[in-house]
Image (cartoon, rainbow, N blue to C red):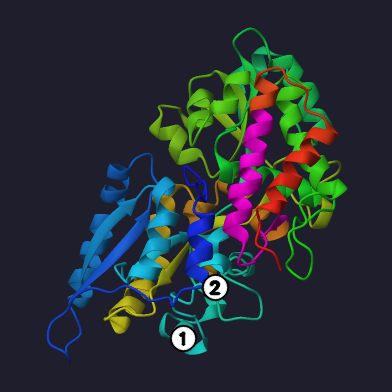
Amino acid sequence: MRRVRAAAVGAVTLSLVLSAAACGGGSNGGGSNEQPKTLTYWASNQGASIEVDKKVLQPELDKFEKETGIKVKLEVVPWGDLLNRILTATTSGQGPDVLNIGNTWSASLQSTGALLPWDAKNFEAIGGKDRFIDSALGSTGVQAQDPAAVPLYSMTYALYYNKKMFKDAGITKPPTTWDELIATGKKLTKGDKAAIGVEGSNLSNNIHQVFVLGKQHGADFFSPDGKADFTSDGAVAAVKQYVDLMAAHKIVAPGNAEYAQNQSLSDFAKNKTAMVLWQTASATFKAQGMNEDEWGVAPAPVPSGKPGTGKQTNSMVAGINMAVFKNTKNMDGALKFVKFMTSDEEQVVLNKAYGSIPPVKTAQQDPTFSGPALTVLRETLSTSATALPQVPEESQFETVVGTAVKELFADAAAGRPVTTESVRAKLEKAQQQMPKK
């Protein structure tokens, strides 16, 4: 995620957290019977830079202070640091009152016991649970438990393509299936130009891509009882298919094996690659100097036919959730702040600024979100996106399988064979690093 939920490092830290008594954060306040007039807020880095985020958020926080008298102390935390910062806060108690979390971490952080459960009473305090779309609620924690967070920004993956590079290659429409993407990609890969960009060192992006391919191959990476299941034929096929874009089909530049967050977007904006699979990337392209008419957006590829559920899934449910530390000294203020940030007005302001989709149903109706690009994303979110496994070990899954994919890309870049056997061996090693059940 520019917004990619960056590498979910800290698996060891998380396992320690799960055995510790979790405690929440909170701001210092006035007297013992007085609610503090300040909230601390850790925001995730959604914009092209931390400074961009401050420019987007500070006017809204000032508006909240004017309305309520509560000052919000803002810290924008880079994705590479966010998960470990949160995990440290759950044990130290030195955390914020309110924070953003990658929605894929919801179940993992829920299991620490540090976050406020969103029961019916708490949802009612922010206007009701039914204000949010179902797909976004599906990534807020373990099913059948009260959610650990509420949706703030929603995103899905799509295929972004460079219109001029397509035209120059005589390609009249974007590919809709993987076979079409490979055929199209071979026409686009010439000299120093590559067909599609990947980020081989971006662990979370690796997970997002292979999870979707896993669904298309009938694999979930976890069994129904929550046990890691990384070595099924479907999981192996999914990982191999993704790495083969470089290893077998040669439509990804070898240097992409070392790419970290946003580097594939930079190449796309500089006309070095013709396609990229990404989440709500328009704001990043604009920040890098691209005009809207230079790129198009289409649903991410499926095996055949049209996107849908099951094996036609073409995106994970991406997005950012907002959580409250259970031990905040200003619960009333924290709930007011979450209500403010998820209000229709703020949802339009913030999601417009970040090029994302409001998870609040009524805010989605604003004309801002009716353009062609966001219509593709909205339809994907409602019809063909699936939440990543809502299990406590999800963050370890991102780390160990994401690393396996990274190592396989390194093999491909170096010219070492990537075979079904080598993929299975990497995934077996990853599975061995997961907690035993």
Q: Secondary structure at mark 1?
A: helix
Does the stretch in magenta take in 394? yes
Q: Position of residue 307 (x, y in %)?
A: 78, 49
Q: Position of residue 370 (x, y in %)?
A: 55, 51
C-alpha gap between disc 2 and disc 1: 23 Å
Magenta residues, start to end: 384-409
Callout 2 touching callout 1 (CB < 8 Å): no
Measuring 83% from the left and 30% from the top, which residue is drawn there?
Answer: 179
Residue type at numbered disc 2: Ser
Measuring 41% from the left and 85% from the top, which residue is drawn there?
Answer: 125
In terms of sequence position, does the residue under pointer 2 or pointer 1 come before the other?
2
Q: Is residue 150 visible?
A: no
Residue 80's label in the rendered image is none
For residue 33, side relative to residue 14 (left or right): left
Q: Say few, some or many: other residues with alpha carbon within 10 Å of mark 2 (under 14 / 14 to 19 / 20 or more).
A: many
Q: Is residue 301 above or below residue 359?
A: above
291 or 184, nearer to the observer = 184
Of marks 2 and 1, the one in the foreground: 2
Q: Position of residue 372 (x, y in %)?
A: 59, 43
Residue 124's label in the rendered image is 1
Q: Is residue 20 above or below residue 60?
A: below
The residue under label 2 is 111
Residue that sits furthest to the left in the current view: 31
Measuring 64% from the left and 66% from the top, which residue is drawn there?
Answer: 390
